[in-house]
Image (cartoon, rainbow, N blue to C red):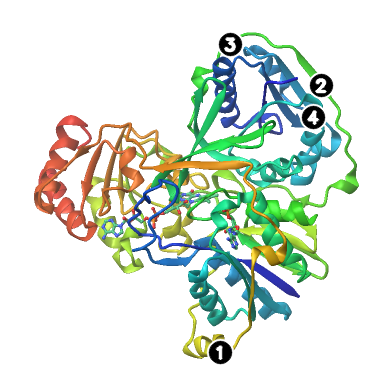
Amino acid sequence: MSGILVITEQTGGVWHKMSFETLAAGQQLGRELGLPVRACVFGKTTPSADLAAYQLDGVIAVEHELLEQYTADGATAALTGLIKELQPDYVLLPHTYQVRDFGPKLATRFDRVLLSDVIAFKVEGQSVGFERQLFQGKLNASYSSAAGAPVFVSLQAGAYRAEALVAGSAPVETRTPLLDASQIRQQPEAPFRESARAVDLSAAELIVAVGRGIKEEGNVPLVQELAEALGAELAASRPICDSGWLPMERQVGSSGQTVAPKVYLAVGISGAIQHLVGMKGSKCIVAINKDSAAPIFEVADYGIVGDLFDVVPALTEAVKKARS
Amino acid sequence: MKILVALKQVPARDSQLKVDAAALWLDESELSFEINEPDAYALEAALQLKEQHGGEVVVLCAGPERATSAIREALAKGADRAIHIEDDSLGAYDTLSLARLLAKAAASEQPDLILTGLQSDDLGSGQTGVVMAEVMGLPHATIIMAVEVDGASLRVKRELESGWFQHVRMPLPAVLTIQSGINKLRYATLMGIKKAKTKEVKVLTASELGVAPAATVRLQSIYQPQRVKQTQMIEGNPAQQAATLVEKLKFEVRAL
Ligand SMILES: Cc1cc2nc3c(=O)[nH]c(=O)nc-3n(C[C@H](O)[C@H](O)[C@H](O)COP(=O)(O)OP(=O)(O)OC[C@H]3O[C@@H](n4cnc5c(N)ncnc54)[C@H](O)[C@@H]3O)c2cc1C
Ligand SMILES: Nc1ncnc2c1ncn2[C@@H]1O[C@H](COP(=O)(O)O)[C@@H](O)[C@H]1O
């Protein structure tokens, strides 16, 4: 085969939602290049039948006892066999934590570099450019592949929309990869959560989130006062929670909570993708940042370029006045 | 145990980034540099493991001459010695050939454990450690939040998405990619800084290691991202900005 192979992700029969974004990207690339698109899902058993409802040239379920729990060694071995056999031109993956774990290893098996965390394809004729972010989203870069098929690409969360996925029908086949327990060196234990979440930020109407621009733990009350004046929940970027300045359960982002309040006010937050995925769905985003080039302004509806230590107290005052 | 820490020097976090004339990298003339953030946590994790189990912490860094300051800082914090692959043309190496270069230098040390950061702040490809593991035939795990060593095996805490975690066991030697924030970074003491000056830094070149640059992927150009969203920028002094924002929240967003 030539064409596009989309590797999806599921755990215990539950789809990772980025699987569908990646499938949509695969369909679009397939249309633009005139290439067939197939999807693959792996596990002990898989919900492969769900994929039969999309316009795809085939769905391949790679199923094996040893794929019951994800391991980097197991996934790599199973998918290496499939890719060798299918010889796709492009292998697309969602840039999930799991793909971060095995994607580079898989690409290395083929002497390729995974073009990771890609945000867009730029197709011109038969040549494809790959757009990625550098410096935590402060700059973009365009990459090309210089080595030919297979080209491995992982796609950033939200880069393509699952809603664009075209329905249709696709034949499903199941394969059993050649796998041996001795190939798998990682022994995973059951996933767990650290704490019962006392705070459910997903229900909040208003959120004020604080980032590393706050500089010191002792300054956090400044933002807390603003949150109180607004009647908002207080949230934070990861480094604030890592430092223990606010509890983990207030962290927004890919490893924390996903929120969609009416207003999300980001104070001193740069807007790295791992933070953005947790709050991009907010109805209205306000950003206060001293750097006019901060990536947070790319998603903001309202922006204030300024020193938070001047702007936040003034804002707290103005809110109190408006409220009284 | 012998622990190798792969450490990269990157532009300091709050730098103003200027694209160079060829649009292929940054104009570095006015930049200051620092240790890539997760790598600093990887170093700290290595130093703590050494405190628990004894052994040696070796820093491995590929970079131009300026990277010496990052290496000295790591030595001042307590690393025992360093290997500096000094080369001005590392831009010609893609992640695979760079990982091969690092792996080549690492292999001759025969470490029990290799720690890398999970991602570099500049290129952000998030894969050098995983590729090193594959090239060296070692098991690995990524986005690591805690490391326990018992005898010849490891038990690590991997971060999964949305607040989930998982413990994974694997045999040593192994490669781990370390997440930022997993421990509290130490500062270099005055004593440490003094001692660092006497510690060994082995300087190697890429050609001595016999790994040629290769590019299976090529960086074509770097540019400012185009803004897709129309952001209303609120001007004025802080009091005016605050008053305007409150107006907008009240009448346009209807959230107050
Ligand atoms: C696998 C992985 C998972 C991650 N998960 C998450 C996650 O769930 N949530 C998350 O948030 N991050 C996460 N991160 C980290 C993320 O990549 C960023 O490092 C982090 O979001 C940065 O936090 P920040 O914006 O607060 O800090 P910085 O990036 O340091 O930004 C600070 C900002 O404050 C501004 N500033 C400084 N001083 C002032 C001032 N006086 N006034 C106004 N503005 C000022 C600066 O201009 C800068 O833009 C993850 C990373 C990885 C690799
Ligand atoms: N030039 C380098 N020298 C030493 N270590 C590096 C270098 N480049 C990358 N690394 C390591 O690999 C990790 C991941 O980098 P990257 O794959 O570029 O995101 C970094 O956090 C470093 O630990």
Work out how far the residue at label 1 is from the one at label 4, CA to CA, in angstroms: 53 Å
Residue wearing tag 1: B195
Work out how far the residue at label 4 is from the one at label 2, CA to CA, in angstroms: 11 Å
Counting from the top left corner in percent of width and height, residue A255 is at 53, 47
Cβ–Cβ under 8 Å for marks 3 and 4: no
Q: Residue B84, labelled with which disc?
A: none
Work out how far the residue at label 1 is from the one at label 2, CA to CA, in angstroms: 61 Å
Identified at 62% across, 8% down, the residue is A168
Callout 4, which amino acid? Leu
Identified at 67% across, 45% down, the residue is A104
Q: Which callout, 2 or 3, points at the residue further toward the start of the chain?
A: 3
Instruction: Report the chain holding disc 4.
Output: A
Q: Nearer the viewer, mark 4 or mark 2?
A: 4
Tell me if mark 1 has few (under 14), some (14-19) or many (20+) residues whose alpha carbon lies within 10 angstroms of its own: some
Q: Is residue A146 above or below residue B98?
A: above
| Nearer to us in this view, A239 or B165 | A239
Callout 3, which amino acid? Ala
Residue B252: tell me if it is visible.
yes
Tell me if mark 3 has few (under 14), some (14-19) or many (20+) residues whose alpha carbon lies within 10 angstroms of its own: few
Instruction: Report the chain holding disc 1.
Output: B
Q: Is residue A180 above or below residue A235?
A: above
Instruction: Report the chain holding disc 2.
Output: A
- Same-chain status of marks 4 and 2: yes
**Picture quadrant where residue A20 is located:** top right
Q: Secondary structure at mark 3?
A: loop
- Same-chain status of marks 2 and 3: yes
Residue wearing tag 4: A82
Callout 1, which amino acid? Lys
Q: Residue A167, labelled with which disc?
A: 3
Q: Secondary structure at mark 4?
A: helix
Is residue B10 left or right of B51 when viewed as pictured?
Answer: left
